[in-house]
Amino acid sequence: MKISCLQENLAKGLGIVGRAVSPRSTLPVLGNILLAADNGRLKLSATNLEVGINCWIGAKVEEEGATTVPARTFIDLVNSLPPERVDMELVTRTQTLNLHAGRSEANIKGIDAQEFPLVPVPEGEGGISIEAEALRTAIGQVAFAAATDESRPILTGVLAKFEDAQLTLAAADGFRLSVRTVELSQVVPDPFSVIIPSRALTELGRISGEQEAPVSITVTPTRNQVIFQLTDIVLVSQLIDGNFPDYRQIIPKDRTAHTVVDTAVFLKACKTALIFARDAAHIARLHIKPGSELAPGSMIVSATSAETGDDVSELDASIEGDEIEVAFNVRYLIDVLSVIGTPQVGLDTTTSSSPGVLRPVGEEDFTHVIMPMHLGR
């Protein structure tokens, strides 16, 4: 293998695939990145057997070939090279990759590419097309609500439901639920659902940051992998087997109060409350007081710590319904308010022991449910 490319492009490609490298594996080759000449371009691949990423960058290929090199060593080396052309040549007999850039030269010992697991690439047409920005936004509004605890593997995933011309993403960790719908450019002939690991979707959101063309989604015929195809990147993820809980049963149908507040002001009040709530099980109280003819409605956000003190913020609010006091985990409020893109947010409440429902005002495609916390008197 004899290949040349720009240091800037190589570093960017490694930044994309590097996160899929397995940090701790019994297979040494999983700690490596595959470099391969592929139709006049340089293909970079990394996988931890759950998520695999392929990335193609422009290169001048003089001799075909492939090898794998230790990811951490290679990434650190490339990042330290001058922003010039990088010439790479493989000594096949010893599996040593020789690099030249400017006045720098290095040799890296690799492992034969034959030992590297294949990261599949979709063949032909047939994927489901979705706008990249809409998919990125939906991932940002849903993936954070998935569980990080592996005791219930199903909840570490995000339900992706393809039906008619719509994709619904849903994630829940037992304390909160996020549901977002996205319009598809075509009707899905046969509705189906899969459960995608939230880590894979978060990674997809990260690497699709500059993607403008639609993303193509393909589920393999065996239904055990999903493939996301971007312009020069392919991300492959294993799917989680099992049945996702019926999230629709968690969303309350009734409400006794509907509160509308400024999203940024509410977020700021929650961040202030966290300063004290972090010493008190992250409990923040919301006291919702409807207005009268003489005074507007208000929402009071407060937190109290026996050790450090307390904090009270009063927010102007438009309230329909009854006065109520309810407590939530303030970190969960911060998480959801940080991904609501509208100037105002609506909060529906019923009782102090019932879940609260947050929705962006003016948008019907996002719903977030938070379980209440017990209010000790």
Image (cartoon, rainbow, N blue to C red):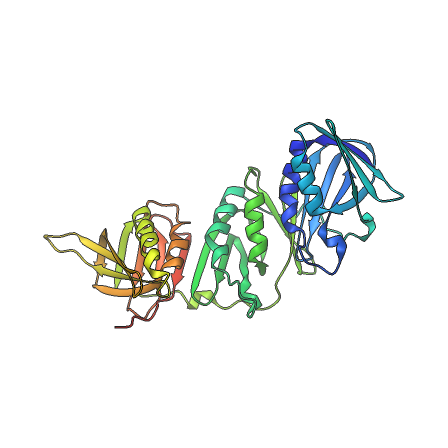
Give the farthest residue toward the right: 93
Residue at point 77%, 46% (across, down): 68
Residue at point 76%, 45% (across, down): 69
Q: Is residue 7 left or right of residue 274?
A: right
Q: Position of residue 315 (x, y in %)?
A: 24, 51
Q: Position of residue 40 (x, y in %)?
A: 77, 33
Residue 13 falls in which quadrant of the image?
top right
Q: Is residue 201 visible?
A: yes
Give the farthest residue toward the front: 307
Q: Position of residue 160 (x, y in %)?
A: 54, 57
Give the farthest residue toward the bottom: 377
Q: Is residue 228 above or below residue 305?
A: above
Residue at point 19%, 58% (across, down): 290
Q: Nearer the viewer, residue 267 or 224?
A: 267
Give the farthest residue toward the left: 294
Q: Is residue 262 left or right of residue 16?
A: left
Residue 250 falls in which quadrant of the image?
bottom left
Quarter the C terminus occupies: bottom left
Q: Is residue 276 left or right of residue 106?
A: left
Residue 242 falls in which quadrant of the image?
bottom right
Q: Is residue 232 visible?
A: no
Q: Is residue 15 left or right of residue 258?
A: right
Q: Position of residue 376 (x, y in %)?
A: 29, 72
Quarter the N terminus occupies: top right
Q: Nearer the viewer, residue 184 or 314?
A: 314
Q: How many tags in the picture?
A: 0
